[in-house]
Image (cartoon, rainbow, N blue to C red):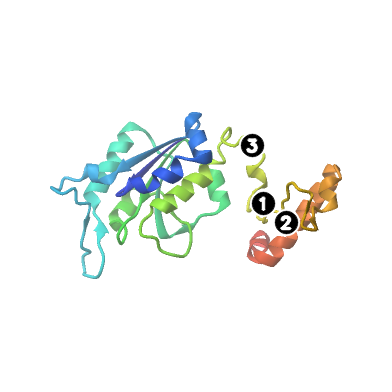
Amino acid sequence: MRIDIVSVVPDLMQSPLSHSILKRAQDKGILEVHLINLRDFSSKTYKQVDDYPYGGGAGMVMMCEPLSKCIEHLKEQRSYDEIIYMTPDGDQLKQKTANTLSLKTNLLIICGHYKGIDERIREKYVTMEISIGDYVLSGGELAAAVLVDTIGRLIPGVLSDETSALTDSFQDELLSPPIYTRPEDFQGMKVPEVLLSGNDKKIQDWRYEQSLERTKKRRPDLLDNNLE
């Protein structure tokens, strides 16, 4: 999979994309992530990519021309399965969305900055709009890094144990059950006996019951969604 990310400040994403699982995925050649500096496509003397909004108001807006030139340049090199704009008013990122995107080949992510991008870019190029939550960041870079991480870890071969991602929270609309590791007894708090039994069916049944109970207590909305 290849993911291209367009940003005004691409250096913001260097660290989260260069460590741990995502680094191993790129080292293996399973995942390619390319950061594109939008300023490289500005025709202005000082590489300006923003301007004042029509109609007045505070803040600056990312202009059409640099974004259009950048997107057209990238599209000449490859076809994109999705062109994604990270924005607070997009569809909230869900595990199902990550699952779907992990099956794609080429993705282009646009990071908003300032007050966002000119609406005409959204209308002409963007095929998906994604939000990582009901809050506003200084730009879409950190949101894009979150999206890449959620997608990247699902690509076959990225995780050493590919079944690990299948047991994550939200994969089956339930939260994950409690998890334990050594020591068996920590300050008088013991690992549930069923996990030490070696009986796979009992263990799976216990984990499902714990997932269900935890979801009822913490995220009952997930169970409501299953009933819709």
Q: Are marks 2 and 1 in contact (CB under 8 Å)?
A: yes
Q: Element at badge 1? A: loop
Q: Quadrant of the C terminus?
A: bottom right
Q: Which mark is residue 172?
A: 1
157 in relation to 211, above or below: above
Q: Residue furthest left?
A: 45
Nearer-the-camera pick, 119 or 113: 113
Q: Element at badge 2? A: helix
Residue at the spot of label 2: 211
Q: CA distance from mark 2 to mark 1?
A: 10 Å
Q: Element at badge 3? A: loop
**Looking at the image, can residue 218 be seen?**
yes
Residue lying at 48% horizontally and 30% vertically, measured from the top left? 27
Q: Which mark is residue 162?
A: 3
Nearer-the-camera pick, 46 or 174: 46
**Which amino acid, mark 1?**
Asp
Give the side of residue 43 with respect to residue 146, left or right: left
**Which amino acid, mark 3?**
Glu
Residue 86, x across and y down, in percent: 40, 53
Q: CA distance from mark 3 to mark 2?
A: 20 Å
205 in relation to 225, above or below: above
Decide which of tag 2 and tag 1 comes sooner along the chain: 1
- Quarter assignment of residue 114: bottom left
**Looking at the image, can residue 102 be seen?**
no
188 in relation to 109, above or below: below
Q: Are marks 3 and 1 in contact (CB under 8 Å)?
A: no
